[in-house]
Image (cartoon, rainbow, N blue to C red):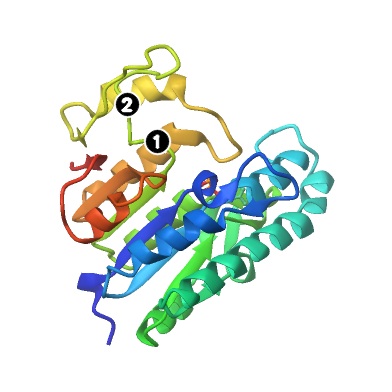
Amino acid sequence: MLHLKFLTLVKLGGSVITQKKLSPPTVNKMALNRIAKELRIHKGPLIVVLGGGAHGHQAAHAYGFGDASTPLEKLLAGIPSIRHNMTLLSLEVEQILNANGIPSVAIPPFASVRMHDGAISNFPTDIIKGVLEAHCAVIIHGDVCLDDVQGASILSGDTISVYLAKALDIQRVFVGTDVDGILEEDPRINPNAALVSVIDSSNKDSILAGIGASSATDVTGGMALKTQELLELANQTAQVAIFNLTVSGRLAALLEGKSTTCTRMKL
Ligand code: IPE
């Protein structure tokens, strides 16, 4: 039986686990080895969600994903290279986690998820539950998926995280990025912008309005969408936090239930 109470989901931001500027896309093995050692602190069932980073975003951008005017044929032509790159990334992560004593199996969304106009229409979770029950961590990743309106669309790691957290009633969701969390102001305008340590119903609207304008855009919507999606979760999930995965020790602290620099969400 799966002890859902201890089920934890950690999203590994693509900019941390891949070398964003290198082409062909390259995995950041040093960061991943350190992250694997931090993940090992968690003793219960674990889902690790990978962002696309260089592996996902370079190819998605080249084939016009994220641009509403891209013709369907061009999107479809992008499927093989996005799939291939994301598979390479997931296999490298799988190898590093297993080598660090975390038995784990990568599961590709493309093989089972269907999209409808950019949103998930079908996402079976039986295999995921089964793998967890087999005492393996699940590695799942942002992907390109078949879409019955757009032909193909990008399923981001953030969307997967929120979907699985709801579907499996996950109690702890930790989203690793390359920034400390949500800042009160755009750091490009104010480099000393303060970190928001808690988002709750009192400051939610003003914070969302602030990051809407400032977040860097990528094919999957950047920080504003990430925050919005995670806030939806904060109602039902005991712990939701965005933290800086490039700083060693913060993931470990979250997993141990200790306080650390991050933005927590509580509605
Ligand atoms: C993107 O997922 C997936 C693809 C482009 C295939 P995310 O949007 O979660 O990736 P990162 O973490 O921002 O790189």
Q: Report how far apart the C-alphas of labels 1 and 2 lie in the structure.
A: 9 Å
Where residue 262 appears, as percent x and y from the top left, is 26, 40
Task: Kindly identify the residue that appears in the image at 38 percent across and 54 percent down.
Answer: 162
Q: Is residue 236 visible?
A: no
In this picture, residue 215 sits left or right of residue 22: left
Residue closest to the far front: 30
SS at mark 2 in the image: loop
Pointers 1 and 2 in contact (C-beta within 8 Å): yes
Q: Give the vertical position of 267 relative to 224 (above or below).
A: below
SS at mark 1 in the image: loop
Q: Give the vertical position of 208 relative to 74 (above or below).
A: above
Tell me if mark 1 has few (under 14), some (14-19) or many (20+) residues whose alpha carbon lies within 10 angstroms of its own.
some
**Residue type of the residue flagged with mark 1:** Val
Q: How many labels does the image show?
A: 2
Look at discs 1 and 2 and give the one toward the viewer.
Answer: 1
Tell me if mark 2 has few (under 14), some (14-19) or many (20+) residues whose alpha carbon lies within 10 angstroms of its own.
some
Mark 1, ligand 1, within 8 Å: the answer is: no
In this picture, residue 243 sits left or right of residue 157: left
Task: Kindly identify the residue that appears in the image at 28 percent across and 68 percent down.
Answer: 41
Residue closest to the far top: 189
Q: Give the vertical position of 244 relative to 203 (above or below).
A: below
**Residue type of the residue flagged with mark 2:** Leu
Q: In which quarter of the image is the C terminus?
A: top left
- Disc 2 designates what residue? 183
- Disc 1 designates what residue? 179
Q: Can residue 149 be seen in this view?
A: yes
